[in-house]
């Protein structure tokens, strides 16, 4: 059984390394995995990863690499060289790009490559407006599954997908394929100035087969971040008991 602490990743969405480290220290002893995304990496670069790792924390570097295969290979190699345990690429770059990123990450230090399927801020209407899918029922769901299948075939260790697609991805891709789920809360529904549209509860995501969930604003902006983290950890632990390993 994977421990609840292994399943919770807290996003360090801050404009400076110093602010990010305050949250790391606040959650020390409860949370061991943190996500560094575009904002913090743009501000602090590889030093941001080094600073979080120096606290004994594990880093998920979420840069969503999306470029031609050779550029993606080189970028993934550099991202893996920071010491991050997981890095992200975007499935929209295609199978050749995904495979190139996997190769680059392997040579850069062995970070696992997670493929972003469809951003949780997008729904069928938004995707139709940019010509990606039609507006029919299930269009987003089908696109996510297709991209998960492509990512697995390209050698990615797993995918990033919303809570709404977890169960279907697990059925399609089987055990051992990582599913990391953003857009989760300690409750169903949004709030918190939400720009994420395909959301769900942390407990439900784990029950449906997610390996880990990513939480940002709910913890970051809480008056008591440790209390929020404890609520999430309790829900994750309870859900994991019912879902198995």
Image (cartoon, rainbow, N blue to C red):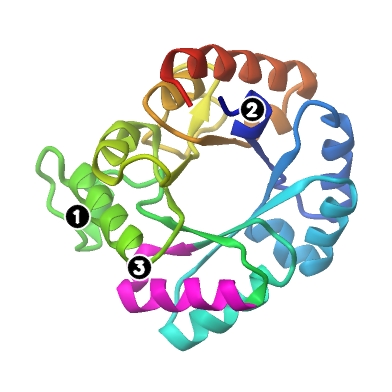
Q: Residues within 10 Å of mark 1 (few under 14, many from 20)?
A: some
Check disc 1 and report its element: helix, strand or loop: helix
Q: Does the magenta stretch include residue 95?
A: yes
Q: Do the residues labelled 1 and 2 touch (CB within 8 Å)?
A: no
Disc 1 vs disc 2: which is toward the camera?
2
Check disc 2 and report its element: helix, strand or loop: helix
Q: Mark 2 points at which residue?
A: 218
Q: What stretch is highlighted in magenta?
A: 89-107
Question: Number of marks in the image?
Answer: 3
Q: Is residue 57 magenta?
A: no
Can residue 227 be seen by looking at this rendering? yes
Q: Residue 128 carries which label?
A: 1
Q: Mark 3 points at which residue?
A: 154
* Residue 89 coordinates in the image, percent (x, y): 48, 65
Residue drawn at (50%, 14%) of the image: 241
Q: Residues within 10 Å of mark 2 (few under 14, many from 20)?
A: some
Q: Earlier in the sequence, mark 3 or mark 2?
A: 3
Residue drawn at (57%, 83%) of the image: 74
Query: Eyeballing the image, is 218 above or below 55?
Result: above
Q: Earlier in the sequence, mark 1 or mark 2?
A: 1
């Amino acid at each position: 059984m994977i421990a609840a602490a292994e399943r919770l990743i807290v996003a360090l969405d801050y404009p400076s390394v110093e602010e990010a480290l305050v949250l790391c220290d606040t959650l020390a002893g409860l949370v061991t995995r943190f996500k560094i995304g575009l904002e913090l990496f743009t501000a602090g670069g590889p030093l941001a990863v080094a600073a979080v790792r120096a606290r004994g924390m594990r880093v998920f570097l979420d840069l969503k690499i999306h470029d031609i295969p050779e550029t993606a290979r080189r970028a993934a190699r550099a991202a893996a060289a920071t010491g991050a345990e997981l890095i992200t690429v975007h499935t929209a770059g295609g199978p050749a790009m995904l495979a190139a990123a996997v190769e680059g990450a392997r040579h850069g230090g062995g970070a696992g490559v997670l493929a972003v399927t469809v951003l949780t801020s997008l729904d069928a209407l938004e995707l139709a407006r940019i010509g990606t899918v039609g507006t029919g029922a299930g269009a987003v769901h089908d696109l996510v599954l297709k991209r998960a299948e492509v990512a697995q075939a390209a050698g990615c260790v797993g995918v990033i997908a919303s809570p709404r697609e977890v169960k279907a991805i697990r059925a399609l891709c089987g055990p051992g394929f990582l599913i990391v789920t953003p857009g989760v809360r300690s409750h169903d529904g949004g709030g918190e100035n939400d720009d994420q549209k395909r959301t769900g509860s942390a407990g439900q995501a784990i029950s449906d087969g997610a390996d880990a969930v990513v939480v940002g604003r709910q913890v970051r902006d809480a008056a008591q971040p440790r209390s929020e983290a404890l609520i999430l950890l309790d829900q994750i632990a309870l859900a994991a008991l019912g879902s198995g390993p």
